[in-house]
Amino acid sequence: MSNATEARELELCGKVELRIALAEDDKLQALLTTYLPPLLLKLGSEHASVRNKVVSTCQHIKIRLAGNQNIVLPVAKLLTQYKENPNVAMIRHFDLMFIQQSVGKLTSGDQMKLLPVLLHGLSDDAEKSTCATIFNLFLRLLPQLRIPVRGSKEDGELRQELGLDQHEKDAKFVSLWFSKLILLAVIRSTASGITCPGLSVQEYEFLTLNGKQETWDSAAEEGLNLTQTKLGVLVFLASGAFTDDERFLPALFASGDTNSRISGAGEDMLKRSTMSLEDPEMIGGLLKTYFTLKPALQTRLLVLLTKSATSTTFPVQTVKIVQQAIRPDDNTNLPTKGLETMKFRNALFNYMNWVSRIASAEDIAQVAPQLVGFLRDFIEDQGWPIPHEKQDHESASLRALAYETLGSLAKTTPSIALDKDLSLVRWLFRSLTEDRSSGTISVSIEGALSSLLNIFQPPLEKEILFELRSLLLKYMTLQDDEAVRSGRFSAARWANRCLEYNDVVGRWIDILALGGRTDERSDVIEEGKKGLDPYWYRLLSGNRSAPTDHLFLPAWSELVGTFFTSQSILENSSISNSMKSGMGVDSVSVFGNFAASKINAFAAAVTYCRRMLLLDALERSDMTFDIDADWERQLDVLFLSDKPARHIMRTHIKSVDGKAVRVFLAASFEGMLYNNGNGLGECGKSLVDVLSLAPLNAASDLTARVEELLPPVKSNNVATRETAAHAFGILAAHPRNSTIFVERLAKSLLSGIMPWSSAIGSELNQVSGAMLALGYLLSRFAFYGRLHTLEVSLIQESVDIALKILASVRDSTLKEAVLNFLVQASAAGVLTVERIEKSPMKVDELIKILTTDAKKGNEKAISALGRLSLAFEENSTNLSSIFTTLYELHELKEAEVHFSIGEALSSSSSCWQSDVLLLSLDVDSDFQGPAARPDTMESLISKLLKDCKTTKPSLKKASGIWLFSVISNNSQHPKIQSRLRECQSAFMGLLSARDDLVQETASRGLSLVYEHGDTALRKQLVQDLMSSFTGTSTQLKVDEETELFEPGALPTGDNKSITSYKDIVSLADELGNPSLVYKFMALAQNAATWTTRAAFGRFGLSQMLTDESIVDAALIKKLYRYKFDPNSNVQRSMNDIWSALVKDTSATIDLYFDDIMKELLESILAKEWRTRQASCAAIADLVSGREFEKYEKYLGDIWSKNFKVLDDIKASVREAALSLSMSLTGILVRQVEAGASVKASSMLKEVLPFLLSEQGMESSAEEVRAFATITVLKLIKKGGKILLPFIPDLVEKLIGLLSTLEGEGIEYVRLRAAHYNLTEAKIDNARTTAVSRSPIMEAIDRCLDTLDEPTMKELVPRLETVIKTSIGMPSKIGCSGVLVSLATRQNFVFRPYADTFLKVLQKAVLDRNNAVSAGYARACGYLARLASDYSIQGLASYSKRLYFEAEDEVHRQISADILYAVSKFATDRFNAFASAFLPFTFFAKHDFDEHVKEQFEKTWSENVGGSRAVLLYSTEINSLAIEKLESPKWTIKHSAALTIADVVKSSGSEISLANATAIWPSLEKALALKTFEGKELVLDAFVDFVKATKPFWENDKTVAAQMKKISVREAKRNNELYRPHAFECLGKFAELRTDIDMFDEVFGMISPLLEESTNEDKMDTDDDAKTGKLEEAFVTNGLSALFLSLNVKSKTPSPTSYLPKLLAISKAVCTSNKSTAATRMAFYERTKGLFDGYCKENVKAPTTDYGVALGLYTLLDIASGSGTEAMRIKKGEAAETIVRAVKGGVFGTADGGRQVVVGEMKRMVREGLGIERSPQAKEAFGKVLRGFE
């Protein structure tokens, strides 16, 4: 059976072979089309004989095909067969062989059909040898694929059309090989195993078909151009045939190509790509490919990897990338030095930064140590710390980036930096101080150091801590000559972040930063301050230590010991030794650590120790003390004024190591004495503060040195004297000092005081100091209970001199010192009534003197009065006098004075039970002063309560302050406790005061009452406060002097203002309008109400409102609004109250949301501006962050009322409304930006119609309109598809808004443009530009981008109406822009409406404004892209009508603009209707208006290949021109004539008979027109026509005769401008018409005119005067015409017979004064031409006349040497032709007279030659002489 099958198959093959062998060549293609595919199919036969037979037949076919190159095989069938037999290699081989043979011969359509077949199944052949050939074949056919416009419907369907949606595997395969193709760089080498960067050897061979050189040789038959192929592939990839995933790799590789076209296409695709960079497989492939890529592409890939978190999960590859870049194995693939290297390393470091930030802890731990090492190597290889060579900016920037990257990496893996020797940190600190690469490198190094800070979070290991301390101290004390720059800032910063706050070394570093140098940088000082401040330390360190933990603070004893005893800061550290040198003091000196410039830090160290001592006391106690930003001030306040706090501090100091206290006191003492008593900083204050709390034994070491304080006591500095005197008093009075010693000191001071009366200057200061010291000495001696041991006379003497000085002293400083003496002496009981009475001054006199000073506001005098009262009995008249004096001081204005008065009242009434005196006790003793005075206290409280209710402002203010002071200083007094309820009432009454101080006093007074009251009192107080808060008004009790308004609040115009009730009544009487009283009182009442609310809660009142039972809707809704009151005081108060009342703000607002919203919407339009303003702010806050459903029902109301307020009369209300609008807009925009959702749609339905209404964008209020517009623009920018339903409305409104928002003055400026040196066109151009760049236009474009078909259908009628009804120029420009955008961006959905709008624009384009008209014309061009053929033809007809029927040039300009726009923006459509457009364009480009002409010329030149193109449309052009020659408009007639002339010019040098026949009638008709400007062009064309159509007029005698008639007729026209051109053309015509002799006719016409023109006796008249160039042209062209009209070929009469006439007229012209250089030049040229012609034609004169020859020769004027060089050359040439003519017999053949003429001629030429200097002219003259030979 198999044999039979074999035989049958062989028989079939034999028959096919025979038929092919016998076939004729013209039948072979049909035969092969039928039989070749089945024949090749037999290659799959199981029989070898059959296969061999087929192979032999194929060989025969190849031979036949070689001789018949035109045969095209059935490629499609063969390709299908190839695909259907994947496993039969022989079939595929021969199929492919024959496919390649014919594929290039297919039509482009057939080739394009093969592409899908080639693609399908390609991936299945990946491992087969034929795959490369098929891929190459696909690349060859790819250019035939028509790629649709990106984004079009066709583009979206391309993937489906190519079948790639069903063959995704093939699409991925092809895109993968496309990416490899992009990397391909052809290596011109025949060696095996070669490749290029990015490709393996196998991939390179695949793309080059096993290394065939001709594969990528475009000169080869089947070769490809690599660049063009890559570009084609990228275009294909960018189409819709591929997904973003598939095109990503090729785009990436293309973006790094050196060819800008390829890289640009790649960049474009990458920008549009939505490819995820988090695909592990893809990233892994990229990392694998990275090492084979070129450096430029590696850079590009690194940039991309820096955006991929997944890329950080490949630690091995990451290390390898960095290693290859910094420590490469070889140098074969490194970036070139310069910019490429910079870019590469920048990308590399940025990628390392990315890895450090994004990689997981596990991955980063693997890579960070190695990467840090590589970066250190990179820096050190450049030279470290000093670079080997000077670095340019780029290199320095790279080095800086390396430092930064190193820091980023090191911080991710703590173990890198936390080694025991801190090598990396040391390396960075050394780099910081020694790296000289650039001035800004320190910023990067400091950044790297900062990156490591978090690694060193305390607590640290002991060894690391020791090394770190050592390192920081080293760089904190590094000398300037040891470093390039200071590392002190970084050292201080590290100390503050890495060493705990209780670390003494860390604080020492801060002390050095604060004052270690005199010229320290401000940032170092600031860092030192922060390190010493526990509040800042906690902030900077992340609050690592709790503020209540006593270990948070440094151990005080250690701190003092370290700072002031030269104790080694670091045990066994050489660093400590450097701190003991620099001053000549012993090792125990407190200045041991403050050598040289470090002395500046001494005061800071002392002050810091004092604060830590006091702070530590509070921290260890139960007292709550918050360490906040103001903790230092609060600490000082507690120290000075809080009795419990001082007790805690005193107790704590007693518990502290006594030695440390003594060292600190010694340090403070030394600091105060330093610099000859001028002291260091606040050392004296620290000494006094600690002494005042220290136990007796603490100061024992200093008592013996008290006399050392005398220099500072007598200092010229007031503060120094005061502090030193205070310290002197405490130390000198110390029990350790004997009474004798103290007496000696006192006497010494007294002796210093004695010369007070004569002392001046510094002596007076010494007296003042001594007086101060004496007061402190005696008072402290009394506090210690030792006063009785002193000599009585000494005490009396001291009192006497003090009072004596007080009585007569004039110096204020000394008086202050005396008053201080009285204060101290009175408080301590030293100043008694007895001693006063024994003195020169009596008690009454003393009180009087003090009263006088007190009334001047002297606080010392007031304090002295208060303390002096201690010397009197309770019911004494002196005591009453003092109280009376103090009460009378209420008129004083200074608030501080009133607090002093309050303290004086307190001490006067409670004596030593008052806190005022108890707090002044600054020695360790149990001093007991006079007891309290209960009756006095009772009367005092009664008096103050009464005065708090007075209507007199000054008294009311003073009484409130005094009452507060008395209560605060005597809070536990029974009399006060019993009357707290009354005190509360008094303070409540003061809340409504407008004075902030009174309000604060009242508020703090209420808090004080609340604090010291019982439960019932507290409850009552809360009820009173709430009543005051929720009430609508505050009762006012007034009399004439009651101050109702602030001075200046209501000015009257005469530099006065209404302030009191009396002023209101006076004004009302003056104006005769009593109602003014009520109006002003209403104002005052309202002010009082809000003042009360402002005070409410400001100073602690809110803390009383902790009872939640008072919370209800009525309170909450009002309180919520009050929180946003414009008055900052009210606002602050309300927030405090809210915080106290509302524990959960969110829950409370949710509960009362509707109540609050209704209240706010009602009050937003209230009468009071502050209510409206607060409501706006409250609504903004209320809706912010709330669910839309909460306020959805209120949204419309909110917008509506807000826009009303947006136009409020008060600016601040408008601002609040604007802020609310912005909040609402932000909410809306965020919803819209989040995408299409039900919530966003609901909001838009509510808001957008409102924004577009008369209340929004069309509002009459400018602010409302502006904000509505801005809001709409924001929505459009973020909206996208969700805005679709609103787009028709939006576009319509926005177009109208373009005109609305234009400045009102623009139109005025336009109308008066000339006055501003402008033109209307310039202004309109600027307006057009403004519209096109307007954000509104951008918003419109965004709207148009989202259009779909239903929305477009709705938009069209709206847009049509807008175009027809728009009035403003910007809106019209906007309409044209919209049409352009629709035609370009939305051509698919807009196409059905293009015809409609093209029709609409035919009216719109006629706008009076040129810019608008041009804009609509441009839109016509874009619309023409989409319009139907019928509409295009209609547009062409319309343009023609517009042009030909125009009454002025404006419509013709519009026609030009339309045609140019169509040709430019719809070129294909223009070309499709070229026959309709081009003839008209050609005609119109001859218009006389420059703009019209220019536009039509541009249209013609940009759409026509050359001048010969005119012939294609000559019939249409001629037809149009002939028609328009009959036009009644002269402009059209003339344009038609010029058109015909141009047709002739464009027809070339030879015009066919047919064309000539067609052109002549129109040309003849054009020539018949009367003369007009430009007709000379028609005349020139006539001459060209005669020249180009000789066969035409030779065969038609009628035409020839008519031509002659026309030439003569035109020459006879009388137009002075036209005649010279007519003469010129007449001459040229006569020269061309060798068939006729025109000389007589021409001579008869021109000669008289020339004679008349050259007649010197002729008188010029206005009518016939010819001047200048016109006359020159007339004469020159006339003479030329005579010469040219002489026909040398004429036989009868002889052409020489006219020479005498010619000579005569030439002589008349050339010798006249009208002859110019141009005329003579023409004469020379025409003479030469004429006699050249005679000689060529061998003309012989029938008679001899050598005189003519000599006459013409003479006219050449050779002998004179006149004229320019060119003229003299022309003379020689003309003379040479005359000589030849003489010799040739032109003037006769007889010898008679010839020699004479020749001799004369020679003479003349020799004379000319003799004076000639030009070589060229000499040569010409020489040629003349040679001609005689």
Image (cartoon, rainbow, N blue to C red):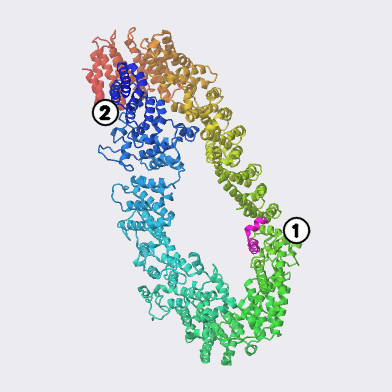
Q: Say which label, 2 or 1, has the lower sequence index.
A: 1
Q: Position of residue 1113 (x, y in %)?
A: 70, 58
> For the point 65% across and 57% down, which residue is it?
1149
Would you say residue 1142 sits in the magenta stretch?
A: yes
Q: Position of residue 1769 (x, y in %)?
A: 29, 24
**Image quadrant assignment for residue 873:** bottom right
- Return the residue at label 1: 1079
Q: Is residue 809 visible?
A: no
In the rendered structure, find residue 549 and report the number of the disc placed on it: none
Of 1363 and 135, nearer the camera is 135
Quarter occupied by residue 361: bottom left
Q: How many C-alpha atoms fall within 10 Å of the one at disc 1: few (<14), some, or many (≥20)?
A: few
Task: Give the prevailing secondary structure in the magenta stretch.
Answer: helix
Identify which residue, 1416 or 1638, lies in the foreground: 1416
Q: Please state which amino acid type lies under the numbered disc 2.
A: Ser
Q: Does residue 833 appear left or right of residue 371 in this picture?
A: right
x, y (%) of residue 415? 39, 62
Closer to the camera, 118 or 961? 118
Bounds of the magenta span? 1128-1152
Task: Name the quarter where the N terminus is drawn.
Answer: top left
Q: Mark 2 = which residue?
A: 1814
Q: Can you tell which quarter of the image residue 134 is in?
A: top left
Judge the density around disc 2: few (<14), some (14-19), many (≥20) Cα neighbours within 10 Å: some
